[in-house]
Amino acid sequence: MATTLLPIDPQMSPQRVNRILTISANLLPAEVVVARRARRARTWTAVVVLFAVALCGGWFALAYHGKQVAERDLEAATDTVATLQFKQREYSGAVQVRNESTALSAQLDAVMANDLDWGALLETLRTTAAPSQIVVKGVNGKLHGDEKGAALPGATTTATVGALVVTGTGPDKRAVAAFVDALAEQSTLANPYVTSVTTEDEGVTFALNVDLAEAALCGRFTDPCKTGGN
């Protein structure tokens, strides 16, 4: 029995002879693929819609809560206004009296702008005269009022509001001169000068003029009065 050997094709390598061809094919019908895609699209659409609904619901809840808070605040403010209006009606009489009192005080401040504490002024004259053994017998004073040019020029630049004529007695002319110097040091007085001195058996009698400084103005409805002259 004879065996015939066929020659091996030199173009076929062992790797190529043993290779298994990979062949794939999509056998699903097109309708199934389209249906699956449609289901995925519907699912994502539903998710987006639910997310939007949740956002709208949250915004609505927040807005509703804010509305309730605003209504409570409005109700509280309304109650406060009602209470204040009731109190205003209840105390309207007291408020009117207070307003009238304030207006009256303002009018008194204007009317009593040139008020003067004559008692304190007389006490200043007496205490200033005591060290020189001067006895004040009489005081005649007046305020300038609206007469701005009533005061005569003096040795100081202090604004004056009135003038005094002071009469009294003293041991001698030196005592009178010391009294005048002491008056010049007072903050409520200015420009003192002697107008007459008469020598008598027991001393001298004198008369002098002195201006009232603006610092002398005081009273209940203006600047409070200070005790003493300095």
Image (cartoon, grey):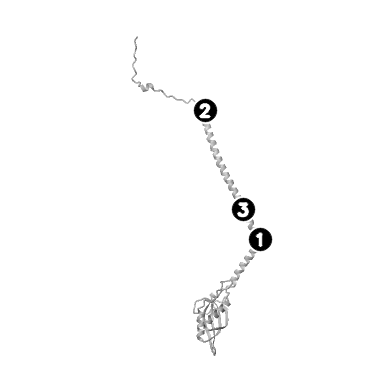
First in sequence, mark 1 or 2: give its number: 2
Q: Residue at x 50, y 83 (%)?
A: 178
Q: Are marks 1 and 3 in contact (CB under 8 Å)?
A: no
Which disc is residue 208 wearing? none
Structural crowding at the residue carrying mark 1, measured as other residues with C-alpha within 10 Å and reported as few (<14), some (14–19) or many (≥20): few
First in sequence, mark 3 or 2: give its number: 2
Q: Residue at x 64, y 57 (%)?
A: 83
Q: CA distance from mark 1 to mark 2?
A: 86 Å
Q: Residue furthest top?
A: 1
75 relative to 106, above or below:
above
- Horizontal side, residue 151 vs residue 2: left or right: right
Give 161 or 178, whichever is nearer the viewer.
178
Residue 41 placement (x, y as % from top left): 52, 34
Residue 192 placement (x, y as % from top left): 52, 81
- Return the residue at label 3: 76
Structural crowding at the residue carrying mark 3, measured as other residues with C-alpha within 10 Å and reported as few (<14), some (14–19) or many (≥20): few
- Residue type at tag 1: Glu
Q: CA distance from mark 1 to mark 3?
A: 21 Å
First in sequence, mark 1 or 3: give its number: 3
- Horizontal side, residue 8 vs residue 153: left or right: left
Give 73 or 106, whichever is nearer the viewer.
73
- Return the residue at label 1: 90
- Return the residue at label 2: 32
Q: Secondary structure at mark 2?
A: helix
- Residue type at tag 2: Val
| Residue 61 shows up from this direction | yes
